[in-house]
Amino acid sequence: SIAEICILKGLYFYSMLQNNLKIPHLFSKLLVLVILLLSVNCFSQQKEIDSLKKVLTETIGDTLRINVLLELTSLYRTINLDSFEIYAKSTIEQSKKYRKHKIAKAYSNLGLSFFYKSKLDSSEYYLNLALNSSENVNPITKSQIYNNLALIHYKKLQRDKSITYNLEAIKLQSGNFEELSKSYYNLSCTYIDAGLTEKALEYLKKAYDASKKGGRPDVLNAAAINLASINLDNKNFGEVKYYLNVSDSLYQKNKNPNNGYLNNVFWGFYYDDL
């Protein structure tokens, strides 16, 4: 049947992803993806890393050195977690000595490195250090810290705290649709887990709209798939088809196997329920 063909295609894309650990092991009609991982060009990143390391060997000012360390930390986040942690710690030491206003971002990066390694208590400790390290924390940095604290409490099944931190992040993100799209989406996932479908729908739609304005196709696809999923449960087949076509369009543009997996699996669910 068409449903079986679609699901088999989805499983093919899923098998492509397994070696790269791009997505969690989730296979249900109500899909929740909290951490949105981006496809990256590792070759291009390595060239940039090599260039930045060369800069560190030169005689440069303290501010530039810290900025280079922050950039290296950011680049390693998607390709090497051990290096990510090493450069985060190095940035903290440099920031303590020379530029304390940069230390919030440095602590935040270290907290994030522990999060990716599932060391949630250590992650929470450093994120709280980041939050309290200065009265002049950049609003966007602060909102990202709140977002990451929300994810920690989500993983700890502390939904009330997760919701509170997400809402704090949203207050600081007015007009920043890229950041808002992530906060709205993660908040919707928490509401899904809590069984609050109407609230989940509200924030999924906000995430969907913000991701289009903020240029976040990864959030757009995740929101579209979850909107399709909830509408499928409610037998709103027209809405399901609309959102799956959005996901189709995104896959045609970027050929991301993650999009191909999710899209085909949910087309299979669609034809199975139709």
Image (cartoon, helix red, strand yellow):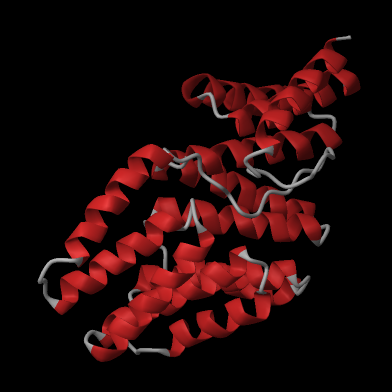
Instruction: Name the image quarter holding residue 59.
Output: bottom left
Q: Nearer the viewer, residue 197 or 5?
A: 5
Vertical placement of residue 268 versus 214, above or below: above
Residue at figure coordinates x 53%, y 75% from the top left: 111
Q: Is residue 142 left or right of residue 54?
A: right
Residue 142 in view here: no
Residue 233 in view here: yes
Where does the image place residue 127, in percent across and percent down from the top left? Answer: 52, 79
Which image quarter holds the C terminus?
A: top right
Q: Is residue 254 left or right of residue 199?
A: left
Residue at figure coordinates x 73%, y 49% from the top left: 32
Where does the image place residue 165, in percent across and percent down from the top left? Answer: 59, 74
Vertical placement of residue 205 versus 99, above or below: above
Vertical placement of residue 210 versus 136, above or below: above
Q: Nearer the viewer, residue 50 or 112?
A: 50
Residue lying farthest top? 1
Q: Is residue 59 left or right of residue 39?
A: left
Residue at figure coordinates x 48%, y 87% from the top left: 129
Residue at figure coordinates x 13%, y 66% from the top left: 58
Instruction: Name the image quarter holding residue 242.
Output: top right
Where does the image place residue 156, in percent across and percent down from the top left? Answer: 75, 72
Vertical placement of residue 38 versus 121, above or below: above
Where does the image place residue 115, in percent across and percent down from the top left? Answer: 60, 68
Q: Nearer the viewer, residue 227 or 249?
A: 249
Which image quarter holds the N terminus?
A: top right
Q: How many marks?
A: 0
